[in-house]
Image (cartoon, rainbow, N blue to C red):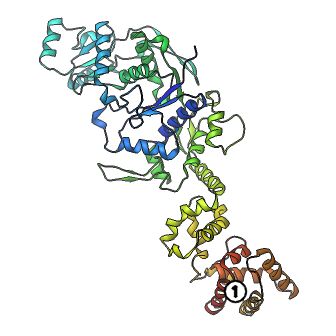
């Protein structure tokens, strides 16, 4: 019987969710949805010293904003909870005891100071089969001494007993078989009495098994721990139900070598977090994709293609298309450079495809910062942004490109005045005013354009001199969308008033 697909995204609430973690969550989600499976959000908060208030809520909000749906989790509930590891202490104790009873783990009393001293004594010290008998643990100490230390409340850890000399094979759906000899593995700590919590290595194995996870899809940085996890599945007798492993390629710096970091974003001016993050300890504020003006679908599309491709040259893909076409067969083994300029391109493309009314709704809060937005209808705002959206990468760029629709220019670009305003320009603009006053239907942009073009041609005027001066008086500079689309939206009265004011205010530049 084929196993039901159940995947988990298991972040630690130790700070904001990194964009690399977002991609991991996305790939889990795409795979689960493609196979009609279940997406689990599990909070791995066993490292109590690194817990950061607000981080868990941040993770949930980030996934909701991006449209990465969760089926089971702390907020959603489910039949396999609790979904927060700090609430599963009783469960973990049972499995720690099982390993101890079976002789596959042991208790170690070594203090941090003793371990540090040993590292100074032995070069490249590793707590393993070659050194464990010289340490303070239940394998090396008499049973009576071990019990005395436990009864006295001495802090200890439980370490996994790894037998050396064995080739451990990790089958990975992207990388194939990865073989590592157990002799290079140390006896990892699985449990700490001090806080009565397991480490990542034990907790995630137990939880993946009990939650019936079918595929563990995580970052490449976890690949070195995979052999240990294979050995733990065997130690518990769960080898037959071990999930498939998938280790995703790293997200790399845009320049240079190494893993993408927050410092790279700070240095080059792009976010590395999905949402803005306010550090509760330092007060530092880190930028987020949402607050920087990115659309969630653009971020999802951009991230999906960092380490995966659909097998052809498509770039713009909906969530449904990503779900349909996602495959580990097309995932790269090597890291993917984080091209933040490409992220802007994706956002531009998604803004271009956004309905004008929806875009206007996003723009209205920005518009209200500059003018009384209530004096403009929703239809007018939508029509205005529709003419300039091909020029923007972010919604916030709309004001710089569309401000003239909402307020008449009070200044005129000096470089354009110098180049476009001639001695005869006021006379030409006066004639243009008279011509426009006679246009019956200003809402017909094509008809207005034909009338003006015929006038220019009939009088043998220089097209550039007339049209650039016309644009300068109406817009304030010689740029913007099609001139007669602008005048259609502004209307006859406003267009003529702006030309008149331009003629009154603009003076010939000094020689």
Q: Which residue is labeled 1 in the image?
A: 421
Q: Quadrant of the C terminus?
A: bottom right
Residue 98: image location, x then y, percent:
31, 11
Q: Quick check: 191 above or below 99?
A: below
Kind of element beneath mark 1: loop
Residue 393: image location, x then y, percent:
60, 58
- Going 46% across and 46% down the picture, which residue do you hit? 273
Quadrant position of residue 503: bottom right
Q: Quadrant of the N terminus?
A: top right
- Going 50% across and 56% down the picture, which residue do you hit? 292
- Going 39% across and 38% down the picture, which residue do you hit? 75
Residue 355: image location, x then y, percent:
64, 58
In this orientation, does residue 511 appear? Answer: no
Residue 413: image location, x then y, percent:
61, 79
Quadrant position of residue 192: top left
Q: Nearer the viewer, residue 448 or 36?
A: 36
For residue 436, side relative to residue 506 (left or right): right
Q: Nearer the viewer, residue 186 or 120?
A: 186
Q: Quick check: 424 above or below 364?
A: below
Q: Quick check: 231 above or below 282?
A: above
For residue 469, side relative to residue 246 (left or right): right
In this orientation, does residue 86 appear? Answer: yes
């Amino acid at each position: 019987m084929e196993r039901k697909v159940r995947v988990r995204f298991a972040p630690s609430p130790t700070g904001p969710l990194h964009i690399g973690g977002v991609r991991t969550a996305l790939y889990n989600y795409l795979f689960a949805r493609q196979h009609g499976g279940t997406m689990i959000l599990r909070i791995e908060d066993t490292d109590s010293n690194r817990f950061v208030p607000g981080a868990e809520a941040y993770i949930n909000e980030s996934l909701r904003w991006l449209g990465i749906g969760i089926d089971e989790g702390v907020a959603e509930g489910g039949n396999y909870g609790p979904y927060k590891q700090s609430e599963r202490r009783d469960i973990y104790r049972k499995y720690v005891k099982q390993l101890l009873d079976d002789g596959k783990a042991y208790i170690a009393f070594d203090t941090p100071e003793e371990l540090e001293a040993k590292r100074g004594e032995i070069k490249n010290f590793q707590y393993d089969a070659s050194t464990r008998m010289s340490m303070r643990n239940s394998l090396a100490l008499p049973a009576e001494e071990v019990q005395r230390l436990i009864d006295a409340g001495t802090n200890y850890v439980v370490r996994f007993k790894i037998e050396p000399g064995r080739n451990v094979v990790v089958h990975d759906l992207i990388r194939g078989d990865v073989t590592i000899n157990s002799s290079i593995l140390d006896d990892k700590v699985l449990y700490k009495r001090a806080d009565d919590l397991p480490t990542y290595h034990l907790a995630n194995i137990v939880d993946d098994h009990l939650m019936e996870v079918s595929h563990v899809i995580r970052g490449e940085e976890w690949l070195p721990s995979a052999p240990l996890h294979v050995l733990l599945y065997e130690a518990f007798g769960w080898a037959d139900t071990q999930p498939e492993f998938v280790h995703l390629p790293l997200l790399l710096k845009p320049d240079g070598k190494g893993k993408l970091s927050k410092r790279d974003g700070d240095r080059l001016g792009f976010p590395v977090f999905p949402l803005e993050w306010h550090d509760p300890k330092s007060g530092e504020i880190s930028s987020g994709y949402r607050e920087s003006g990115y659309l969630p679908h653009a971020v999802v599309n951009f991230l999906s293609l960092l380490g995966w491709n659909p097998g052809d040259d498509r770039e713009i893909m909906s969530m449904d298309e990503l779900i349909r076409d996602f495959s580990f067969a097309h995932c790269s083994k090597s890291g993917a450079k984080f091209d933040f300029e490409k992220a802007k391109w994706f956002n531009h493309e998604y803004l271009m495809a956004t309905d004008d009314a929806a875009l206007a709704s996003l723009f209205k809060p920005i518009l209200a910062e500059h003018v009384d937005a209530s004096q403009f209808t929703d239809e007018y705002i939508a029509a205005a942004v529709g003419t300039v959206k091909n020029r923007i990468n972010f919604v916030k760029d709309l004001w710089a490109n569309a401000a003239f629709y909402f307020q008449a220019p009070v200044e005129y670009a000096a470089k354009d005045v110098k180049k476009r305003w001639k001695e005869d320009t006021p006379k030409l603009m006066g004639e243009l005013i008279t011509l426009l006053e006679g246009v019956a239907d200003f809402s017909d942009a094509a008809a207005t354009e034909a009338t003006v073009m015929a006038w220019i041609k009939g009088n043998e005027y220089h097209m550039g001199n007339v049209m650039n001066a016309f644009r300068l008086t109406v817009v304030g500079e010689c740029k913007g969308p099609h001139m007669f689309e602008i005048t259609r939206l502004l209307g006859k009265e406003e267009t003529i008033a702006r030309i008149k004011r331009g003629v009154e205010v603009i003076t010939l530049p000094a020689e």
